[in-house]
């Protein structure tokens, strides 16, 4: 897709959109992966919300 997975740490002037709050609902595999990649790309205000007592979604709560 042409999107770099890791932001160059030497870049200091990021657009203001990189500080915009991002909410991910549910701590399943897709949300945790999305939060990881957003953080690696330089987004600094990513929050994952989970209603259960632990994250992992169906892979942690249903499959075992």
Image (spheres, rainbow, N blue to C red):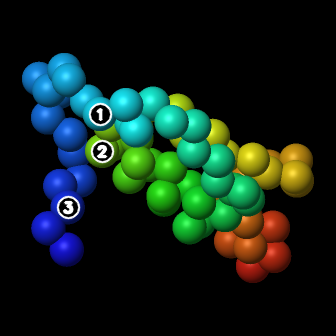
Residue contact at pointers 3 and 1, CB within 8 angstroms:
no
Residue drawn where x is 19% and y is 20% of the image: 12
Q: Nearer the viewer, mark 2 or mark 1?
A: 1
Which of disc 1 and disc 3 is earlier in sequence?
3
Residue contact at pointers 2 and 1, CB within 8 angstroms:
no
Q: Which residue is mark 2?
A: 41
Q: Which residue is mark 1?
A: 15
Residue 64 showing in the rendered view: no
Q: Nearer the viewer, mark 3 or mark 1?
A: 1
21 relative position to 28: left or right:
left
Q: Which residue is mark 3?
A: 3
Give the answer, above or below, for where 6 lies relative to 15: below
For the residues marked 3 and 1, what is the alpha-carbon distance in whole angstroms?
16 Å
> Who is closer to the viewer here, 18 or 60?
18
8 relative position to 40: left or right:
left
Which of disc 1 and disc 2 is earlier in sequence?
1
> Who is closer to the viewer here, 61 or 34?
34
Residue 19 showing in the rendered view: yes
Residue drawn where x is 48% and y is 59% of the image: 33
Residue contact at pointers 2 and 3, CB within 8 angstroms:
yes
Q: Quadrant of residue 26?
A: bottom right
């Amino acid at each position: 897709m042409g999107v770099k997975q890791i932001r160059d740490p030497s870049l200091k002037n990021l657009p203001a959109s990189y500080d915009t709050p991002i909410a991910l609902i549910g701590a399943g595999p897709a949300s945790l992966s999305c939060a990881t990649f957003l953080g690696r790309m330089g987004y600094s205000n990513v929050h994952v919300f989970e209603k259960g007592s632990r994250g992992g979604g169906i892979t942690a709560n249903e499959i075992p």
